[in-house]
Amino acid sequence: MKLDQDEYDRIKEIVYKKTGLALKGDKRDFVSRRVANRMGSTDIQSVKDYYRYLVFDPEGHELSELINLIVIGETYFFREFELLRLFGEDILPMIVEKKKKAGQKKIKIVSAGCATGEEPYTLAIILKELLEQPDQWEIRIEGIDINRESVNKARKGQYTDHALRDTPYVYRDKYFQKEKDVYAICPEIKDMVSISACNLYDRTQMSRLFGYDVVFCRNVLIYFDRKSAAIVFENLYRSMNPGGYIFSGLSESIGRMTSLFTMERFKKLFVYKK
Ligand SMILES: C[S@@+](CC[C@H](N)C(=O)[O-])C[C@H]1O[C@@H](n2cnc3c(N)ncnc32)[C@H](O)[C@@H]1O
């Protein structure tokens, strides 16, 4: 089954309207296969009926199922090590200093577009390793993603060694339990992290999130166009504390998408500040 151009454009439009996801280039074959898959699972015979089902499903369950097939994110532990080093060695000490001065002992971080959870658990390990007395801090690391299947996997916290390919052996031994052929994240790290489904583009859903000292929004911008990215950044901006930091991926530029944040340069790397 292949969607005709008109059917493809309509599906593309509804996906964009709800999620900000801009299907760039010609993804007609890719989307056709996923729509055929969902039509099979829902026992719907025609694209016209499927489209109607998508539009008039008030809870958005079917759209969510389709998105699960379209937005699949690659990720792994300790991805983009130099950015994590910048966070751990330069940004975190500044946050700690600021908090101490204000008499506060709480740090809140979000991994926006956390996929299957490798990023938020990596951040928890970094905090555990680098804070002088981690037990004296109230640490909240949240992972959010639109893909509910990824969210469920992230909550499980079980990984193959492929996901740990860039993880230093010392952390692998310390923070993972090997169970047959999977590595399970250990309870002390798992307890620092909570994972939930959330659409970064949806202002209502995002308005429930607040008080972040740091936002990691890495390797997520590829999904949006300039207009939808601007909305995502407005939502993230509102969720952050004044003076909070936001990281994008190494090959992405927040400054090119929004003027809401101030850029700070650390040698060759950039981070943005509210
Ligand atoms: C390539 S992964 C990046 C994972 C991780 N941040 C990293 O850098 O390794 C991108 C993730 O963004 C998620 N995503 C895309 N659009 C989203 C949206 N509107 N709201 C929330 N998550 C979204 C995808 O589901 C995917 O899991």
Image (cartoon, rainbow, N blue to C red):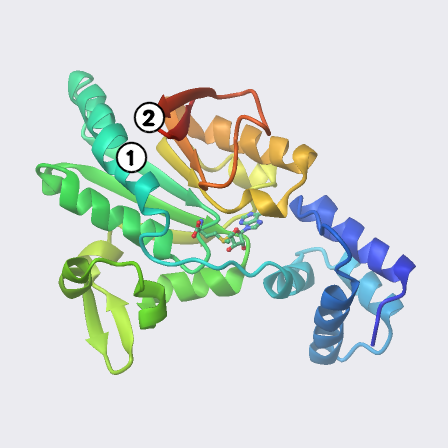
Amino acid type of disc 2?
Answer: Phe
The local secondary structure at tag 2 comes to strand
Using residue 97 as the reference point, say whether residue 218 is left or right of it: right
Residue 197 in the image: above or below residue 221: below
State the residue at coordinates (71%, 55%): 58
Give the farthest residue toward the bottom. 180
Q: Position of residue 187 (x, y in %)?
A: 20, 61
Q: Position of residue 243 (x, y in %)?
A: 36, 20
Whether residue 242 is visible here, answered yes or no, is no
Using residue 32 as the reference point, say whether residue 121 is left or right of it: left
State the residue at coordinates (91%, 58%): 6
State the residue at coordinates (67%, 64%): 66
Q: CA distance from mark 1 to mark 2?
A: 8 Å
Give the farthest residue toward the left. 133
Mark closer to the chain start, 1 or 2:
1
Amino acid type of disc 1?
Answer: Leu
Give the farthest residue toward the front. 268
Q: Which mark is residue 224?
A: none
The local secondary structure at tag 1 comes to helix
Mark 2: few, some, or many residues within 10 Å (few <14, many ≥20)?
few
Q: Position of residue 23 (x, y in %)?
A: 71, 52
Q: Which quadrant is the C terminus positioned in?
A: top left
For label 2, the residue is 266
Tell whether label 2 touches label 1 (CB within 8 Å): yes
State the residue at coordinates (18%, 62%): 169
Q: Quadrant of residue 159?
A: bottom left
**Residue in the foreground of this view, choosing between 117 and 222:** 222
For label 1, the residue is 86
**Residue in the foreground of this view, choosing between 105 and 174:** 174
Residue 210 in the image: above or below residue 141: above
Mark 1: few, some, or many residues within 10 Å (few <14, many ≥20)?
some
